[in-house]
Image: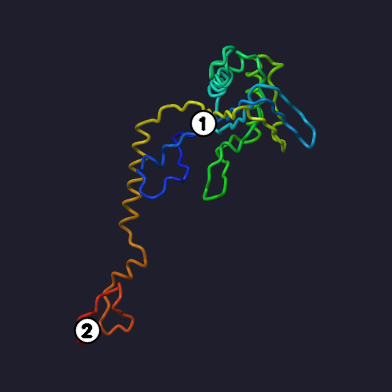
């Protein structure tokens, strides 16, 4: 696991030093309530469900068994369905005995660098496949195996979702409290860098600060120096 929160580079100028270290990596899931959903690979349908939920799962480099169990519990108990009397947000997929379609979605761990997506916060493929399979097994163990479907890990998939509502919920695994001592140390480091940057003038600013002789042919009456006293009345 990374020792401290990381910066996604989107803070901009003028942000406090603490902001540069405020982002923690978490497991992410997009939950969609569906009337039906399916996964196709190479023109062949590999999974399909009727009424239930479709889960797009993004696994991060920091995820552990703790995050896995938390997300399984939240997904299966998320109340996105009506009860028998028509009351909204009252029943979970387990309450209704509906199906679940889970699809691995590493792009949920995207960090934009300008306009280019960067995915280095996603768990590497060789580790993520085992982790994802453990996630599916835990879903089946906690619910009913026959009601849990998934796509094909690492394959190019077409996911067909008939969103019911539409209802879309974003979930993230909880983050541990930030170590205040570590954060204070990082803030001081950032402050020192900012002070150093302000003290060292650029080449162009040094050139602007060099006094020019009135005989210097490059001198002008613009922003580089006021030579109005040299002008004839």
Q: Comparing marks 2 and 1, which lies closer to the viewer?
A: 2
Q: Residue at x 32, y 55 (%)?
A: 198
Residue situated in front as seen by the camera: 135 or 145: 145
Q: Describe residue 111's horizontal placement relative to residue 20 as left or right.
A: right
Q: Position of residue 11 (x, y in %)?
A: 42, 45
Q: Residue at x 31, y 51 (%)?
A: 195
Residue sitting at the far bottom: 232
Q: Badge 2 is on which residue?
A: 230
Q: Residue at x 30, y 72 (%)?
A: 223
Q: Residue 26 got which mark?
A: 1
Q: Earlier in the sequence, mark 2 or mark 1?
A: 1
Q: Position of residue 108 (x, y in %)?
A: 58, 36
Q: Position of residue 50 (x, y in %)?
A: 70, 22
Q: How was the colour assigned to the protein in this rendering?
A: rainbow
> Could you tell me which quadrant the C terminus lies in?
bottom left
Query: Where on the picture, by quarter, is residue 170?
Result: top right
Q: Describe residue 208's horizontal placement relative to residue 144 as left or right.
A: left
Count of all numbered marks drawn on residues in the image: 2
Q: Residue at x 61, y 25 (%)?
A: 33
The local crowd at label 1, few if under 14, some if 14 to 19, many if 20 or more residues have their Cα within 10 Å, is many
Secondary structure type for disc 2: helix
Q: Position of residue 232 (x, y in %)?
A: 21, 87
Determine whether 170 is above or below 210 in the image. above
């Amino acid at each position: 696991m990374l020792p401290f929160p990381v910066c996604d580079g989107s803070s901009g100028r003028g942000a406090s030093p603490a902001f540069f270290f405020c982002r923690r990596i978490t497991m992410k899931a997009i939950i969609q309530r569906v009337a039906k959903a399916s996964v196709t690979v190479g023109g062949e349908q590999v999974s399909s469900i009727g009424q239930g939920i479709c889960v797009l799962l993004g696994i991060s480099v920091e995820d552990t068994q703790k995050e896995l169990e938390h997300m399984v519990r939240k997904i299966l108990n998320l109340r996105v369905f009506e009860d028998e009397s028509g009351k909204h947000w009252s029943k979970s997929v387990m309450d209704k005995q509906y199906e679940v379609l889970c699809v691995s979605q590493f792009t949920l761990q995207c960090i934009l660098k300008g306009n280019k997506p960067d995915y280095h916060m996603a768990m590497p493929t060789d580790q993520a496949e085992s982790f994802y399979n453990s996630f599916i097994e835990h879903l089946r163990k906690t619910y009913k195996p026959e009601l849990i479907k998934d796509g094909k890990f690492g394959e190019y998939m077409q996911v067909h979702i008939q969103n019911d509502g539409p209802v879309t919920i974003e979930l993230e695994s909880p983050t541990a409290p930030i170590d205040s001592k570590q954060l204070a140390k990082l803030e001081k480091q950032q402050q020192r860098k900012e002070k150093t940057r302000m003290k060292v003038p650029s080449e162009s600013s040094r050139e602007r600060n060099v006094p020019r002789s009135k005989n210097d042919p490059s001198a002008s009456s613009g922003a580089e120096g006021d030579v109005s006293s040299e002008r004839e009345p």
